[in-house]
Image (spheres, helix red, strand yellow):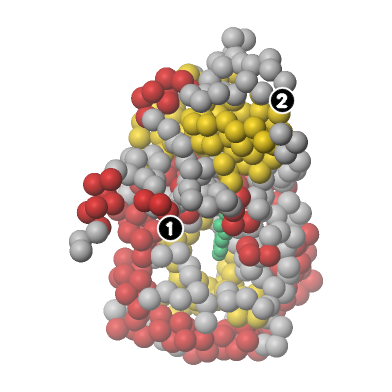
Amino acid sequence: SRTVARDAAGTVTVGGLDVGHLAEEFGTPAYFLDEDDFRARCRAWREAFGPDADVFYAGKAFLSRAVVRWLAEEELNLDVCSGGELSTALAAGMPAERIALHGNNKSTEEITRAVEAGVGRIVVDSFQEIVRVAHIAQKAGKRQRVQIRVTVGVEAHTHEFIATAHEDQKFGLPLAGGQAAEAVRRALKLDGLELVGVHSHIGSQIFDTSGFEVAARRVVGLLAEVRDEHGVELPEIDLGGGLGIAYTSEDDPREPHEIATALRAIVERECAAAGLAVPRLSVEPGRAIVGPTAFTLYEVGTVKELPGLRTYVSVDGGMSDNIRTALYDADYSVALVSRTSTAEPMLSRVVGKHCESGDIVVRDAFLPADLAPGDLIAVPATGAYCRSMASNYNHALRPPVVAVKDGTARVIVRRETEEDLLRLDVG
Ligand code: LLP
């Protein structure tokens, strides 16, 4: 994150605060999130896309009431994909018209709540859902704005579990073969729906703009087909999220203005060629906004040197606070932050405390040979999909999220306690 620094004596600070003091005050493991960095990234996205576009932050990456307030203040919109995320958004005061509801299997209850709250859009994902949303809206005496989620047949270059726009997967309705066009046909007929556009999301942790460009071209192609068949020009397109961030020095992410420039150019060109008015564009970055803004601070518990292999460094968290390494083979970096060391770097693996050998936080890292119990190590770029995917495996207590700003730190999501666990266990 932008306000992390190491002074001449080797002390690491975030937002001007010493990590050693933070560990004393808030305990470990803990996520420390740089609020100024978060807000700066929101502004960079807003400015890159300008007033003719909307930026929806994807709440699945990380959502809390404080985050919702920052988004509201920075004039971003919010994409939620469950009733739980919707509740958090509304509880923190995000205006409903700035919320979009997603999901491939939204419940009747979730749709009803969204319609009644007056969310700005529901992204419908199946033929059944088109009918379901229409009925619910009609019963509520409303016309719900919807977009249709389409799969454009682009396979983003990313881990196969998180590529979503190729055809053989659960999201959206494929353009190829005409299901997307059929969805438009059905949605246009239903009184409860106001079909405002088409939505595409091609994957996550993508570094190359070309996949987005192909998606944009195909989505505009559908708008042209819709105009030819029905005589209506749908006014909106959403090109989803998915912009990658730097987890290690090998990653080379695109900046928001690069993606904005590329998308605008392609949408304008394709619309001009098809004789369409340029629709209002929106995007849904999650990781690219929150990912780089936080790091996880851990305390080293044991150090085990396996001769000829590597050193295993066990920390006080693990796959319960960061499942991404185990699940996606994700790469992270790590640094000793509580002191400096001139000891020789040793090939190390940072592992958690869970009862499972795949419980790896950082697969390969060089850490100083004198690393010892009590040292603090930090894993950067854990703002996205770490706290939001955290679990209670082995009855681990999910760590707090501490927001740091202008030399002050405050808890925005508190550490779980054993009482929290026992409260749910009513047997
Ligand atoms: N919009 C839609 C419809 C999505 O499905 C997603 C992510 C996003 C936006 C935000 O994508 P982002 O900009 O954050 O890449 N748990 C995985 C990532 C799953 C992404 C799911 N959808 C991970 O930890 O890498």
Residue 98 marker:
1
Gap in Å between the C-alphas at discs 2 and 1?
49 Å
Observer-nearest residue: 140 or 33? 33
Give the tally of numbered discs. Answer: 2
Observer-nearest residue: 203 or 338? 338
Is 96 placed left or right of 17 in the picture?
Answer: left
At which x and y percent is residue 364? 69, 40
Question: What residue lies at 76% left-to-right and 41% top-to-bottom?
Answer: 250
Question: What residue lies at 39% left-to-right and 39% top-to-bottom?
Answer: 400
Which residue in the rendered view is the most extreme toward the left? 426
User: Mark 1: few, some, or many residues within 10 Å (few <14, many ≥20)?
Assistant: many
At which x and y percent is residue 80? 44, 61
**Residue type pointed to by label 2:** Pro
Question: What residue lies at 31% left-to-right and 70% top-to-bottom?
Answer: 113
Is 43 placed left or right of 349 in the picture?
Answer: left
Q: Which residue is mark 2?
A: 345
**Residue type pointed to by label 1:** Arg
